[in-house]
Amino acid sequence: MLSERWNDVEGGFHPASAPDYLPVERLREVQLRRLRAVVTRAYDNVDLFRARMGERGLTPADIRTLDDIAQLPFTVKVDLRDTYPFGLFASPMGEIVRLHASSGTTGKPIVVAYTRDDLNVWAEVMTRTFAACGLHRGDIVQNAFGYGLFTGGLGAHYGAEALGATVIPVSGGNTERQLMVMKDFNVSAVCATPSYFIHVIERANDMGLDLRELPLHTGIFGAEPWSEEMRRRIQDGAGIRAYDIYGLSEIIGPGVGSECEHQDGLHIFEDHFYPEIIDPETGAVLPDGEEGELVLTTLSKQAMPIIRYRTRDITRIITETCACGRSLRRIRRVGRRSDDMFIIRGVNVFPSQVEAALLAVEGTLPHYQIILTRDHGLDQMAVEVEVTPEVFSDKVRALEDVRAELAKAIEQIIGIRVALRLVEPRTIARSEGKAKRVIDKRAI
Amino acid sequence: MKLQQLSVFLENRPGHLAEPLALLSREGINILSLSLADTSDFGILRMIVRDWERAAQVLKADDWVVKLTEVVAVDVEDRPGGLAEVLQAAGKAELKIEYMYAFSLRRNHRAALIFRFEEPDRAIDALSAAGCHVIEAEALFAAVE
């Protein structure tokens, strides 16, 4: 009996998880009904969307099947900037109960809005996320995602509360206090960015604290791409299961997708967020299984419905069904973003290629930054790498060797000479715990 | 017989040497001796500190990359030729020296030579056998009180 399973909190099930197990045909019916409603809502209330539909000669009545979504115009990040701050809202302010904003480092941030129903959906998908990661009532969750305009902190907060877990809203930073809380409050699960949590593990080691001896059993990580190598390091170093979650403010925040106990791809909560994979060059929809750019449509958002948002995240939809029994389709973990790609001297370079080289040399991924400059018309690429205790030496020659080895590894992968600089720890800027990977200073 | 040396990674930028030193001074940690190795991009600050465990902790807590290395201190007379004799003994024993630095002790016209040997244990045996005075950490710290 499904209803009994949901109440079996020991198994990590929760009533909110019911839609995870809908039969596929039923799920598609729900999606089509919601798609038609959201397109109508955006058409009636958002000038930009109505104008773009008009250019194509479309009205909401043209959406008869799920495949008809391919006719609809895309939404891109620039649209959110151009309509700053409230231009894409589809609800009057009297119905909007929350605003968040991205911590934009260039120009204006983007603003996103939620009605009461939107917040309920957000809490629901985050509850389903935590349940999929094996948490339940009784877990003590240390939420180290940043609280504030960033969606991470509050998104995870309300989801964990709705699950019935005990939430500690510690927010990001202050690593020694994080460790004190983790130890003294018998924390069983932690939410953080993976790079920050690796820093937490290192600090714990420095302090002689073995996280593997604490009750901590689960980590929920998101907000930046991370590798399987980083997962192994977190799982071994802290003695936990480390899960990847996916989300973006433009769609809702965290809660768009989550791994389950099999840690093999992320289930998209597609009863609320409809996924497509497109060819980033042509915009054509690709069949499930092919790699391309993830496009998402909010099926139930009221305050700010977003139709066919181009995430710039490169992934593919997994065609096999998951052993966990969820009917929700999975995407592969996002390893790279199409807009992080840059072109230098005619060569396409992804930061993930640089990461692979750094990983190969150091064994773990250090904090790094790529800086592009133009000198007398010639593009130059510099990589700054924070020195870690593992590679640091008291001997100049040993450090020079590390630097040369890192530069050579990168050059071999991307085929371009790079200037590699070793820099002090914590000198590469992080925003909300995320590192900005590419700084392009070339004047185009 | 060995001594713990603290090394700190520094970027080669104006003002960067002052930061870790100011931190140690605020903590009341006195530095017996230091040496600086540098390239155009980065430097390595090496220090001999009595309370090296606390110094390492303080620096790490402030996000400096710190490494502890075993070095050997040799006590010589502070006169012409004092260093040369030790280097000759090291040469005879074919000891590889990564780097070294020296400082004057306040008492008895003596100086301390700090050596980073590739093989510190063999170096201690060879230098002691050659009549050099390898000085223990405690005796070294006492000599500068």
Image (cartoon, rainbow, N blue to C red):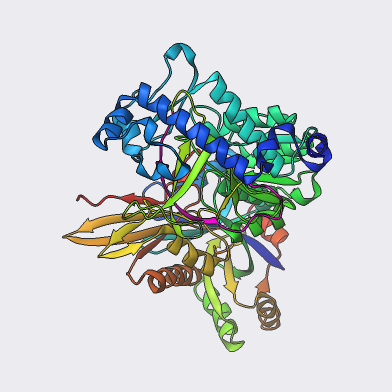
> Does B65 sit above or below residue A105?
below
Residue drawn at 42 percent across, 51 percent down? A437
> Does A277 sit above or below residue A128?
below
Name the foreground residue: A400 vs B7: A400
**Image-based side of A191 in relation to A93, left or right:** right
Q: Range of the magenta residues? A: A305-327
Name the foreground residue: A235 vs A164: A164
Q: Estimate the x, y position of residue A276 in percent, counting from the top left.
A: 46, 48
Is residue A50 among the parts visible in the rendering? yes
Image quarter hosting the N terminus of chain B:
bottom right
**Image-based side of A374 in relation to A430, left or right:** left
**Image-based side of B123 in relation to A293, left or right:** right
Residue drawn at 55 percent across, 47 percent down? B63
Q: Estimate the x, y position of residue A395 in percent, counting from the top left.
A: 52, 68
**Which residue sits furthest top?**
A94
Name the foreground residue: A3 vs A147: A3
